[in-house]
């Protein structure tokens, strides 16, 4: 009885493992599901992601055009010497928008990454690090502009108070 029991356990294990390997290697062919029997097909989450990526690319293109136009206007009117921090802010925003377009266009391309080139493409472009460098630089520049404006205001206020004391 023990030999027969061992043989049955071995058969059960081999049957279970063969079903397990079939279940693990089967790919789902159709991701769309019908809902409620009304024949309407729901969209897969990947479809929504494609629309989101396209929206981000459009926002990036509009931001790139707007920041380039502002930079051009400041340089053409020779105001870039007076407003260095504003020029820096627009340049950082332009950089962020350009990389936003590049990164999300690459994600839309669904590039197959292999080898060393694929690794570096993933590390440099798909990781979105260049976007965050531009955004963080922009945040620091906005804080610098705020401190600069605050110091200008306080300087003018102190000068006005000194003039009031000198007159009286």
Image: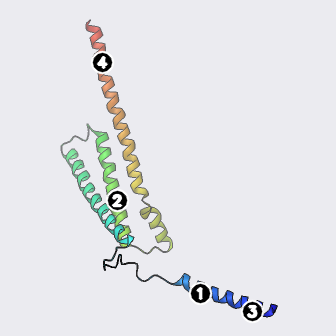
Dot 1: element: helix
- Label whose residue precedes the other's in the sequence (2 or 1): 1
Report if the CB atoms under discs 4 and 3 are less than 8 Å apart: no
- Label whose residue precedes the other's in the sequence (3 or 1): 3
Side of 65 where 30 appears, left or right: right
Q: Residue furthest left?
A: 77
What residue did someone put label 1 on? Answer: 19
Q: Nearer the viewer, mark 2 or mark 1?
A: 1
Q: Is residue 64 above or below residue 85?
A: below
Image quadrant of residue 89? top left
Identify which residue is drawn at 30% across, 18% down. Answer: 159
Q: Report how far apart the C-alphas of labels 4 and 1 lie in the structure.
A: 85 Å
Identify which residue is drawn at 61% across, 88% down. Answer: 18
Identify which residue is drawn at 77% across, 94% down. Answer: 4
Side of 167 where 13 appears, left or right: right
- Label whose residue precedes the other's in the sequence (2 or 4): 2
Q: Is residue 135 above or below residue 84?
A: below
Q: Nearer the viewer, mark 2 or mark 4?
A: 2
Dot 3: element: helix
Q: Nearer the viewer, mark 2 or mark 3?
A: 3
Q: Report how far apart the C-alphas of labels 2 and 3 lie in the structure.
A: 62 Å
Q: Nearer the viewer, mark 4 or mark 1?
A: 1
What residue did someone put label 3 on? Answer: 7
What residue did someone put label 4 on? Answer: 159
User: Quick one: quadrant of the N terminus?
Assistant: bottom right
Label disc, if present, on residue 100 of the rendered structure = 2
Report if the CB atoms under discs 2 and 4 are less than 8 Å apart: no
């Amino acid at each position: 009885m023990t030999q027969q029991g061992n043989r049955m356990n071995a058969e059960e294990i081999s049957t279970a493992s063969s079903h397990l390997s079939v279940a693990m290697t089967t790919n789902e062919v159709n991701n769309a599901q019908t809902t409620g029997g009304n024949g309407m097909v729901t969209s897969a989450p990947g479809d929504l992601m494609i629309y989101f990526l396209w929206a981000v690319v459009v926002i990036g293109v509009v931001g790139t055009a707007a920041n380039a136009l502002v930079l051009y206007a400041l340089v053409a009117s020779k105001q870039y010497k007076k407003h260095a921090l504003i020029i820096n802010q627009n340049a950082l925003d332009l950089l962020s928008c350009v990389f936003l377009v590049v990164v999300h266009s690459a994600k839309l391309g669904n590039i197959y990454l292999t080898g060393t080139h694929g690794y570096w493409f993933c590390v440099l472009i798909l990781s979105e690090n260049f976007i965050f460098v531009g955004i963080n630089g922009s945040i620091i520049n906005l804080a610098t502009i705020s401190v600069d404006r605050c110091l200008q205001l306080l300087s003018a206020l102190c000068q006005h108070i000194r003039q009031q004391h000198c007159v009286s």
